[in-house]
Amino acid sequence: MITNKTVDGSLKIEDDLNPGSDLKVIKFEKAFIIDYSESFHWQGTENMMQSFTISAKKIDIDGSVHENLWTT
């Protein structure tokens, strides 16, 4: 469900070869979820994929920060 409510959060992309080790950390503040989808593939080992698009006031990818100049 897509709403007009903003969310704060983070995503951790883990290294499959080194459990507990992060490949990338993405943090976001005041983000809108503007698109979401799910797909299911009955063959193979990667059966379920969830995809979403966010538009965030502030995003930090491994220490590289971008802040949009939105008016409030």
Image (cartoon, rainbow, N blue to C red):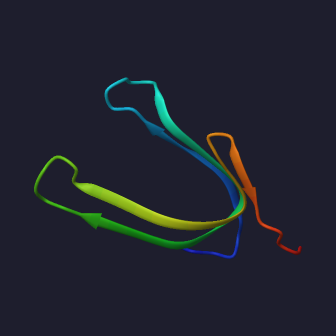
Residue 67 or residue 53, whichever sits in front = 67
Horizontal side of 8 relative to 37 (left or right) equals right
Locate residue 44, reporting x and y percent.
12, 51
- Tell me what residue is drawn at x 46 percent, y 70 percent: 36
Seen in the picture, residue 70 relative to 67 is either above or below; the reply is below
Name the residue: 69% across, 76% down: 4
> Going by the image, does 29 lie left or right of 15?
right
| Residue 29 x %, y % | 73, 55
Depth check, front residue: 5 or 44: 44
Quadrant location of residue 17? top left
Q: Residue furthest front?
A: 64
Count of number-bearing discs: 0
Q: Residue at x 88, y 75 (%)?
A: 71
Left-right relation of 40 to 32? left
Location of residue 27 in the rendering, given as x and y in whole percent from the top left corner? 65, 47
* Picture layout, residue 31 above or below residue 25: below
Q: Which residue is drawn at 38% across and 24% down?
A: 19
Residue at the far right in the pictured view:
72
Q: Quadrant location of the C terminus?
A: bottom right
Image quadrant in which you'd find residue 47: bottom left
Give the quadrant of residue 8: bottom right
